[in-house]
Structures are given as C-alpha cells and as structure tokens.
C-alpha cells in the first residue's frame, strides 16, 4: 500500500465551551484563596505553546492551610457522615462530570495535548465511571471484606502526574471520599486546569468545604504535602525516582502509602495470533496518549517466525496515523506534553540509534510550533539497549524477537518494572500459562490498555505497590 488512502478535511472541536481564567488561586476550604507566596507558573497548550493561565505555586504554609481545612472537614463533617449520605455527593459529582463532559474533554486536550478523541471517549467517561463506581461502595463498606466496621484513615495527601490529569484525580479522590477520608490533591505543574475545574464541580455539587482541597505547584509543593505531619495517607502516581524519595520520607511515620510508578511493559505476539488484530493492539498499546502511559506496551516481543510479516503490517498501519492538532476529531497522536518530555524522548531515541538499533517512522509532517514526535519503531533491539530497559514515555516502540514461550517469559520479565503486559495468541491455555508467569500487575489477553473502575490496577517491583480501582482500591483508604 502506498500513498494516502483518504484525505481528511479539518474537523476541529470548538474550544468556545471552555472558559479559562487568566489566573488561578488555590482551592482550600471550599474557597478560592491566594497563595501566601509570590511564585506563579504559566500553564501552556503544548500544541501551540500559547499561555493558557497563570496558576499559583502553593508554599509550605499553603499546604498547612489545606491540610488543616481537610482535617476540620474530616473531624466535623465527612468522617462522621453516614456512607449513604456521602454516596449522594459522589453520585452528584459523577452526574456533573457527565453534564460537563465536553467542557472537561476540551480543556484536558488543550492543557495536556492529548487528542480530543481520547479525552472525549476514554478519559472523561472513565472519570465519571470511577465516581459512579465508588459512590456505589460508600454505603456498603462493611460488606467489602475489610471487617464489620472499617474506618477511614483521615486526611489523604495525593500527588498526580500530567499524562492523565483528570483520570488520575478520579482514581485518587473517588475511593478516598467514598471511604470517608478528606483530601488535599496536587496536580502536575504542566496540567493543572482540569483539576481546578473539578474544584468548581465540587462547589456545584455542594460538597462540604474542606472535603476536597486542590493546591497547585511544582515538586516542592508535592514534597511539602507528603511530608506534612497532619497527613495520614499518601497516594502518589509518577516517576520511580520521586516514588523512591517519597517512600524514604514516609518510612517510619505511620502514614499509609501507595505508589503507582513507571513501567516497561512487554506486549507478546505469538505466531498463532490474529495479526491484524494484534497490529491494532500494538498501535493502541504504544501510540495511545502519545505513549505517555505508565502501562504502555513499549516493548514488542514478537515470535521470530512471524516477525517480518507483523512488522510490515505494523508499518503500513503506522503510515495511516494522523499526528497534529489535538482538538481535531481525526487526530490519532497529539502533542508531547512538554519541552522537557520531548527532550527526554529525543535523547533516548538517539541512544537507540547510537547503540545500533534501526529506527523507522512513517513520513509525517509535524506542526512548526508546539512539541511533536513522530510515531517511531526500533527494530534490531537488544535487551541491553537503553530503549529496551528505560521508560521512554513517548510514541516509541522497541521490538525484540523470541522463539519459544519460555524465552518470551524470560525476556518479558527481564525488567525492573512490573506494571502490565499483553499476550496475543489463539490458545486459551497459552494465555493462562503466560499470565501465571508474567510478573506484571495487569495482563491483557488479545487486547491492550483496557480500563474499568471495577478492575484493580497496580504494579510489582519498581512499578510500585498498592492497587487502585475495584474493591481492592478501597483497602488503601481504610483502617
Ligand atoms: P514525576 O516527576 O514523578 O511527577 C509526578 C508528580 O509528583 C507531579 O505532580 C510532580 O510535580 C510531583 N513531584 C515531583 N517531585 C516531587 C517530590 N520530590 N515530592 C513529591 N511530589 C513531587 O513524574 P512525571 O514526570 O510527572 O510523570 C511521568 C512518570 O509517571 C512516568 O515515569 C510514568 O510511568 C509515571 N506514571 C505512572 C502511573 C501509574 O499509574 N503507575 C501513571 C502515570 C504516570 P511537578 O509536576 O511539578 O513536577
Ligand atoms: Mg499545560
């Protein structure tokens, strides 16, 4: 196949629905308040480098104010409130997220760079689903397998990354509130805007003041939050390096901790797999959300006998991926979230070439402004190459081959991470054999990157510990 099959006219989603303020303060005790410090940060649209808004950098004093507000709300209102009453607030928030879903999706795409197709069809529906799911648990906690009268922990300090800003917020806030905790959440520096809109939704839902507090800032704000003595529980999603620092600072304090960190997942394709379906799964596994996905299928392990054919089909498919304006409904791959992340992807891709792997990208025109990286595949990758070991967190796939199932397992598990894995084969028995041996928190069979609020998610080894989602996710927020 050569040339373009289809020409697509631009199909931009309107951004009129979104109302972005010039500056944002902190959401503490149900009110917008100014930071006690002078520092501000500009959040930009990574597709255009346009400045969207200025947000405050919360100081240690602001963190203290937020934790105090959360403590008061916990002691006086939210902790003592019966689960059936808490559930009503969570259902109300879930409904408001549905009602304002287009606004949330457009804002997420503008601030993060992800395609509107994904924010509209994946992120925001999952956010609403999470609140509905945990709303349903709020009055049933005594039947959840945590004893006859499980109690909340108190105040949760939550720190999240930029790749799924609103979805990570939902993963953190929904179970915490359902269990009766109050929260202080810090979104990532480059993607604060949907969390700030969520604060408005909390007000619209008449959530009692102080139950949810949103404080913006950089790493220092995150550190002040996780180290604050008034915090009973720390929940962190982000890089393994920062996760390690947090584990050290929390050790011995009695705070409960969950860490969701990086990954380098193997997506394993056997010779009896349906190849076109596998190609779709590989594309979804590594190019979904520009590859900014902790559980991305970033290492393709393909059985040697079909490697050539599979790669041919994969390259043909990659040539049809449309890279560009995140607000265009036809876009498959949006902007890289930040200049810093783009540098990291470029550096690791260069290392792949330098170490001797073969690099390929389809011809693809990238916009002049903004941060972009063409979908890329590396073949001839050795297990020792950096691109086989380190998380690239971008649209870059490293391909390795194997001959036997035992070799596939050996290679798949040859990583310090253990978050997810994929298996493509026609044989159910082989799926079970593989799933038993893969050291990964989630194993997908003949699919990839599927999420459901009822299904627990989390890692082994350097991918962290604790589970989010499902009944298991309640355990992280209960005594
Ligand atoms: P990151 O640097 O670890 O940042 C994550 C969050 O922690 C951000 O809000 C960040 O603030 C904050 N932070 C930075 N230093 C801190 C410190 N010393 N103490 C407390 N908080 C601190 O990671 P990232 O670059 O934003 O995100 C990419 C990484 O996250 C990838 O490695 C990816 O695999 C991982 N991730 C994992 C999952 C999962 O579920 N397992 C999900 C998504 C992402 P700033 O934004 O201001 O730096
Ligand atoms: Mg931004």
Image (cartoon, rainbow, N blue to C red):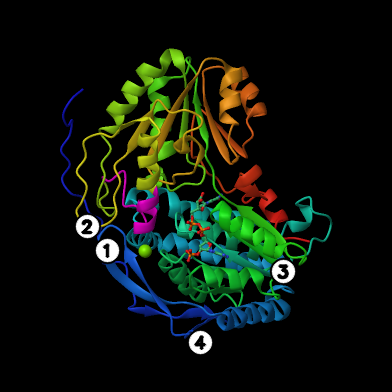
Q: Which residue is at the far right?
A: 148
| Upstream in sequence: badge 3 or badge 2 | 3
CA gap, disc 4 and disc 2: 35 Å
Q: Nearer the viewer, mark 4 or mark 3?
A: 4
Q: Is residue 386 above or below residue 329?
A: above
- Location of the N terminus (image quadrant): top left
Between disc 3 and disc 1, the foreground one is 1
The residue where tag 1 is placed is: 49
Q: Which residue is mark 3?
A: 232
Q: Which circle's residue, 3 or 1, is located before the other in the chain?
A: 1
Mark 4 or mark 2, earlier in chain: 4
Q: Which mark is residue 36?
A: 4
User: Is mark 4 in CB contact (under 8 Å) with mark 1?
Assistant: no
Magenta stretch holds residue 337: yes
Q: Residue at x 62, y 81 (%)?
A: 64
Q: CA distance from mark 4 to mark 1?
A: 28 Å
Query: Which residue lies at the image location 51% right of the left edge and 29% below the top edge?
Result: 383
Q: Is residue 135 left or right of residue 333?
A: right
The secondary structure type at the circle numbered 4 is loop
Label 4 residue near ligand 1, CB within 8 Å: no
Q: Earlier in the sequence, mark 4 or mark 3?
A: 4
For residue 369, which numbered disc appears in the image? Answer: 2
């Amino acid at each position: 196949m050569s040339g373009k099959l289809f020409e697509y006219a631009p199909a931009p989603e309107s951004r009129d629905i979104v109302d972005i303020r010039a500056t944002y303060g902190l959401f503490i005790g149900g009110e917008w308040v100014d930071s006690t410090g002078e520092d501000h940060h500009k959040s930009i649209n990574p597709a255009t480098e346009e400045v969207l808004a200025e947000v405050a950098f919360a100081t240690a004093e602001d963190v203290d104010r937020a934790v105090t507000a959360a403590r008061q709300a916990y002691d006086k209102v939210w902790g003592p409130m019966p689960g059936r009453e808490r559930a009503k607030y969570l259902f109300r928030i879930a409904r408001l997220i549905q009602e304002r879903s287009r606004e949330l999706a457009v804002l997420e795409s503008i601030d993060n760079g992800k395609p509107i197709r994904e924010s509209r069809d994946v992120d925001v529906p999952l956010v609403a689903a999470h609140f509905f799911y945990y709303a349903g648990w709020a009055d049933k906690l005594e039947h959840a397998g945590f004893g006859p009268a499980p109690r909340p922990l108190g105040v949760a300090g939550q720190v999240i990354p930029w790749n799924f800003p609103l979805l990570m917020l939902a993963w953190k806030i929904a179970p915490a509130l359902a269990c009766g905790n109050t929260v202080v959440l810090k979104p990532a520096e480059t993607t604060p805007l949907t969390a700030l809109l969520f604060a408005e939704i909390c007000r619209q839902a008449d959530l009692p003041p102080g139950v949810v507090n949103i404080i913006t800032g950089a790493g220092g704000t995150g550190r002040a939050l996780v180290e604050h003595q008034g915090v009973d529980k720390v929940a962190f999603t982000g890089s393994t390096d920062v996760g390690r620092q947090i584990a050290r600072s929390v050790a011995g304090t009695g705070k409960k901790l969950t860490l969701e960190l990086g990954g380098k997942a193997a997506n394993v394709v056997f010779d009896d797999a349906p190849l076109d379906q596998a190609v779709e799964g590989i594309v979804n596994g590594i190019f979904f959300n520009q590859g900014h996905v902790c559980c991305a299928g970033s290492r393709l392990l393909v059985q040697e006998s079909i490697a050539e054919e599979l790669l041919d089909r994969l390259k043909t498919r990659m040539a049809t991926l449309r890279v560009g304006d995140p607000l265009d409904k036809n876009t498959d791959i949006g902007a890289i979230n930040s200049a810093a992340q783009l540098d990291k992807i470029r550096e690791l891709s260069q290392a792949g070439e330098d170490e001797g792997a073969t690099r390929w990208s389809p011809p693809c025109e990238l916009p002049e402004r903004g941060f972009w990286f063409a979908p890329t595949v590396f073949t001839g990758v050795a297990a020792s190459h950096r691109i086989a070991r380190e998380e690239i967190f971008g649209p870059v796939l490293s391909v390795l081959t194997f001959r036997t199932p035992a070799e596939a397992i050996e290679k798949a598990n040859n990583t310090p991470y253990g978050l997810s894995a994929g298996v493509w084969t026609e044989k159910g028995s082989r799926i079970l054999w593989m799933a038993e041996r893969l050291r990964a928190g989630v194993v997908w069979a003949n699919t990839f990157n599927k999420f459901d609020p009822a299904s627990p998610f989390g890692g082994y080894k350097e991918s962290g510990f604790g589970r989010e989602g499902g009944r298991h996710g309640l355990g992280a927020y209960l005594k």
